[in-house]
Structures are given as C-alpha cells and as structure tokens.
Amino acid sequence: MVTTDGHLLGGRVVYRQPASGFRSGLEPVLLAASIPARPGESVLEAGTGAGAALLCLSARVAGVTGTGVEIDPAMAELARTNVRDNGLTGLDILAAPIEIAVLPCLFDHAMANPPYHTQNGSTSPSAERDTAKRGSELLVRAWIDALSRGLRHRGSLTLIVPAGIVPLCVSAMLDCQCPCTVLFPLWPKAGRPAKLVLLRGVKGARGPMRLWPGLVLHESDGSFTAAAQAVLREGAALPLDIAPSVR
C-alpha cells in the first residue's frame, strides 16, 4: 500500500493514510470530538480505517483506551502503525468485520461512520474505498446492533451519517435498545441543507430525542467558521448534550 504522511488537529496527531482510494475527510475528526469520554474510559470504533477518529480522541482525552475494528487487514495494520507513531499504548486494532469481531470487554462509548452507499449505486474505482463505503440497510443495522451489544448499560453510541439515512439509523438504534437521544446537524454553510448528522444514543435510555441547532462548518467564502476551526484544528470538544454555538 502506497501511503502519504500528514497530520490531524493542527499537527497534534501524525497520520499516515493511503495515497489513493479511501482517504479520511472531516467525518472522523468531528466524530472523535463529539465522544463524551473521560480519562480511564474505553471506546469502541467500527470501521476504524487508518485510525483517525481514535487517534484524535486520544489526543483530546488523555488516558482513554480504545479498540478499533477494521475489516481490511492492510488498513488495520496501517492503523496500528499510526498508533505506534503517535506513541499511544491504550489503543488496539482488530482486523475483522464488526458483526463477528470478538471484543475484549464491554465499552463505555462506541462510535462509527457506517457504510452508507447503496448496493445499486455507482462503484468506486478504488476497491478499498468501495469496501469502506458500500452498505445496505441490513449492514447498517448489523453495525448498530454490534456496537450496541458492545456497550455497557448507559454507555453512549455516536454515529456520523448522511442526512438521508437518519431515519434508518434512528429506527435501528431504538430496536437495539440504544435509542437516539440527540440529533445534531452539521451544516456546510448557513442556510444550506445539512449533509451530515451526528446521532447520539444511550443504551437503556428512556428520555425523548432532542434536536440541537448543530454546527455550521464553513463561512460564505468557504473558510471554516471559528467554531469548526476550534474542533478541526485546535482539538476542541464538540459536546452534543449542551446547546452549542453554531458559528
């Protein structure tokens, strides 16, 4: 695998990823920023890829431990390399489908950017990218079920998903005893429809779902808003359980 060397969080995380095919975008950084983990708590990630989300979370929360599950053995090995290169000792990477992965424990938190491209959609020229993003309703439900089963009671499940599959995910989370408690839109610009949404579920929760104002990512000129810059470059948290500043 040909890789490129880069960084995340304004240089706080060194990050090697494939030179072509499936490359990380904003999603894992935003996902990691939203996880309400505390030092000493454990986090499970499905579809960890080269490890961007776990690496960013570990950079923000000292002492957090985590297990990433990645179906592609080459990507799993690249994630292990990134863990070593960042001097982290509390992260493990399993090469397996999340549906059948043998997990070492129950976790305090779980997170994922599940595969969402439909089976009848256009095929990516990159086999690795196609594997990472090719999904179905059954596969999304299987991911949510596996993540929920891996959580302790009252553990949190956080997903970052396209707006179009929010109903599917909310339904699956309820069926898996991890009902959605927060829906948090990510607006590309003020006044534009949200393309991505963060969903937070809590295992065994009974309260109502709340819709928060969300976060505006870009100014009208395409630059990041101050709030987005704080998360993406400065490593700030993105709490989903309090009303945020959208700008």
Image: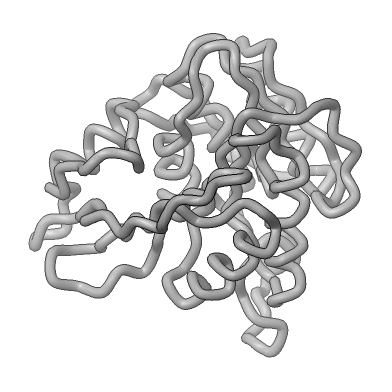
- Image quarter of residue 226: top left
Residue lying farthest left?
220
- Residue in the picture at 73% in, 60% down: 128
Q: Position of residue 129 (x, y in %)?
A: 66, 62
Query: Is 116 or 128 nearer to us in this picture?
Result: 116
Q: Is residue 25 visible?
A: no
Q: How is the image coloured?
A: one colour
Query: Is 110 or 175 nearer to us in this picture?
Result: 175
- Residue in the picture at 77% in, 62% down: 142
- Residue in the picture at 81% in, 26% down: 105
- Check the picture and name the quadrant holding the N terminus: top right
Query: Is 133 or 177 nearer to us in this picture?
Result: 177
Q: Position of residue 150 (x, y in %)?
A: 76, 39
Q: Is residue 50 above or below residue 71?
A: above
Q: Is residue 40 visible?
A: yes
Instruction: Name the side, left or right, on which 79 lies relative to 158.
Output: right
Q: Position of residue 34 (x, y in %)?
A: 41, 38
Instruction: Name the side, left or right, on which 192 lies relative to 182.
Output: left
- Residue in the picture at 71% in, 47% down: 147
- Image quarter of residue 65: top right
Residue lying farthest bottom?
120
Q: Position of residue 177 (x, y in %)?
A: 67, 54
Q: Is residue 225 above or below residue 163?
A: above
